[in-house]
Amino acid sequence: EDQVTQSPEALRLQEGESSSLNCSYTVSGLRGLFWYRQDPGKGPEFLFTLYSAGEEKEKERLKATLTKKESFLHITAPKPEDSATYLCAVINAGNMLTFGGGTRLMVKP
Amino acid sequence: NAGVTQTPKFQVLKTGQSMTLQCAQDMNHEYMSWYRQDPGMGLRLIHYSVGAGITDQGEVPNGYNVSRSTTEDFPLRLLSAAPSQTSVYFCASSYERGYGYTFGSGTRLTVV
């Protein structure tokens, strides 16, 4: 059974304080790893897809990286508007998608 | 605006009542799915469809029915609501199963 574990569950940062969120996974035949952002009361919003170890993707203050066992979402100099829950998901060889429980990020001004 | 539209946004049901959660997308996506989101459980797949007339069960299908008569619509039916079905329900669509989902804004359901 595929598993996705995200840590920490919650993270409080000061504005400008860079940090990383972790997504560890076990999956049968990884075809891709996804990062989503979810604001309170809204549906998840797609951020990135990573397909193979060593791949990196960037968007504004966010950079996602992938290894054979985990992915990191690096947040550089975060702003309060980056506060959200960040979800990680993996897709296996059978096109089954498994989501992690998310990391709730709070950025204080 | 292109996207996934879910209705209603909030609903309270009594145990045993039935209802239908609506989901419509205007992106001509073949793949549509329903998830429920519970604290500490992540998003769990209820049912999905790879095209009009084709549906299949996900991880937690019991107590729910779906049908897909058109590409645009994918309603979720609760047959006899139970308190365990209290959750936030999301509909998602994409061009291909698993990739680049567009989610609706969710329906918060409470069963009392």
Image (tube, rainbow, N blue to C red):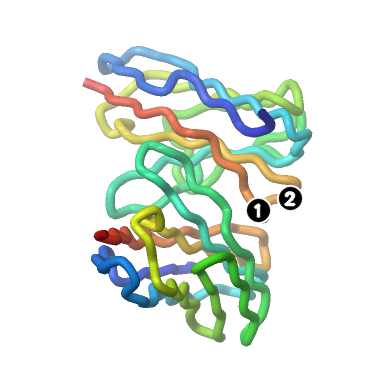
Residue A97 is at least partly visible in this image: yes
Residue A41: percent from the left, percent from the top? Answer: 37, 37
Residue B96 is tagged as 2
Question: Which is more toward the observer, B63 or A82?
Answer: A82
Estimate how packed mark 1 is, as few (under 14), some (14 to 19) or many (20 or more) residues with alpha carbons within 10 Å.
some
The amino acid marked with disc number 2 is Glu
The residue at the point 43 percent across, 49 percent down is A38
Front position among marks 2 and 1: 1
Q: Do residues under tags 2 and 1 come within 8 Å of each other at their CB atoms? A: yes
As helix, strand or loop, the secondary structure at mark 2 comes to: loop
Task: Say which residue label 1 marks.
Answer: B100
Residue B44: percent from the left, percent from the top? Answer: 45, 48
As helix, strand or loop, the secondary structure at mark 1 comes to: loop
The residue at the point 63 percent across, 65 percent down is A49
Write down the quadrant of residue B112 in the picture.
top left
Residue B28: percent from the left, percent from the top? Answer: 78, 34
Residue A23: percent from the left, percent from the top? Answer: 43, 73
Residue at the extreme left of the image, as rendered: B112
Asked if residue B100 lies left or right of residue A61, the reply is right
Estimate how packed mark 2 is, as few (under 14), some (14 to 19) or many (20 or more) residues with alpha carbons within 10 Å.
some
Asked if residue B71 lies left or right of residue A60, the reply is right
Disc 2 versus disc 1: distance between alpha carbons? 8 Å
The amino acid marked with disc number 1 is Gly
